[in-house]
Image: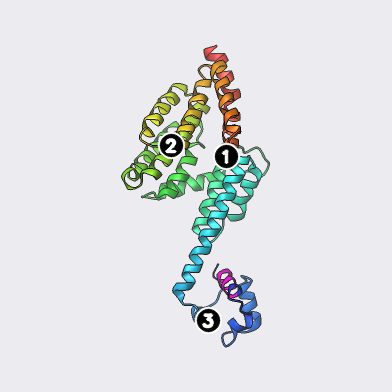
Amino acid sequence: MNAEIIKSIRKQKGLTQKEVYTGVCSKTFYSDFEAGKHSVEATKFQSFLTNLGISQSEFNYFKDSQMKNEEKSLNDEIDHFYKKGNFEALYEVFENYNQDSRTEIRYLAIKAYLLVLITNTNFYKFSRTPFSEILAYLDAMKMWTLKEIKLGKLVLLSYSEKDKASEKKLYTRLIDELAKYEEFDAKIYYEEIGDLYFNRIQWLLMINHIQEAKKCLHAYSEAIAKSDNLYLSLQLRFMTCIVNTYIDFPKYSQELSELLGQLNKIPASETHFYKIISQLHMEKAKNYYQRYQG
């Protein structure tokens, strides 16, 4: 990573490699360093900074800025793949970055993996082995930040029906961890709690706990009642249709179709995302309704 930043700064300043390595090391050594083939000792590194005309604090600023840009770019790519239903590409992100030396990038790789796990694992190279490692990581963290909370919400969707006790424990912890954000940052709290309920309702529907899903939907409505976030209101309306298709499929499948039709007129990436969620539930809801309600 340091070599990449040094190279980037050198090019932005219009300097040659020779101007950076002169008096410090050989041309071959420096070329290999910029190529990422090896690291350098602290004294040589400081000499590189001196030849570049920057301080250590300036270098750290450039490094932080570039890392944030890379993280944002990768996160945007993951969200794009998910909303487009490109699960092979998501899994490739996981394979490419899950061993990255940077913690934030590894976190995004885990996010990509969990999005595949909860949605579509139907291709030959998928493995569930990393899931156990993710659970161990979350268990080991005594205090969760938003990163652990976001991972926990995805894990919530990954449990099977036999894991109800584990799901309940995780759900309870997520509620507790999020509570501290309500006064700290209301915007973050409403967005995260809304997504938590969104995920849990889906999981309850997938294991046919329809009445519990209705209770969770009511809690969802109460939780975001004070929020003025229009996206959360739309998401609540969407999930209300999804839940009710299990109870009255003829009526609410039509309402859901009309809602998706309205959303098609809005140029937003959420439209395709909602279509994916709808496809996951419609056949299951129809079968449930015919068996238990029809």
Q: Residues within 10 Å of mark 2 (few under 14, many from 20)?
A: many
Kindly give the residue lying farthest to the right in the view shown: 124
- Percent of width and height locating residue 52: 54, 79
The residue tagged with tag 1: helix, strand or loop?
A: loop
The residues colored magenta run: 2-10
Name the disc covering residue 44, or none. 3
Q: Is residue 4 magenta?
A: yes
Residue sitting at x 61%, y 33%: 264
Please give the name of the residue rendered at 46% of the width and 77% of the height, measured from the top-left corner.
Answer: 55
- Alpha carbon of mark 1 to alpha carbon of mark 2: how far? 19 Å
Horizontal arrangement in the rendering, residue 190 relative to residue 127 (left or right): left
Q: Which mark is residue 268?
A: 1
Q: Residue 155: x and y, percent?
A: 49, 40
Name the mark on residue 194. 2
Along the viewing direction, whichever of 5 and 256 lies nearer the viewer: 256
Residue 86 spot, x, y in % from top left: 65, 42
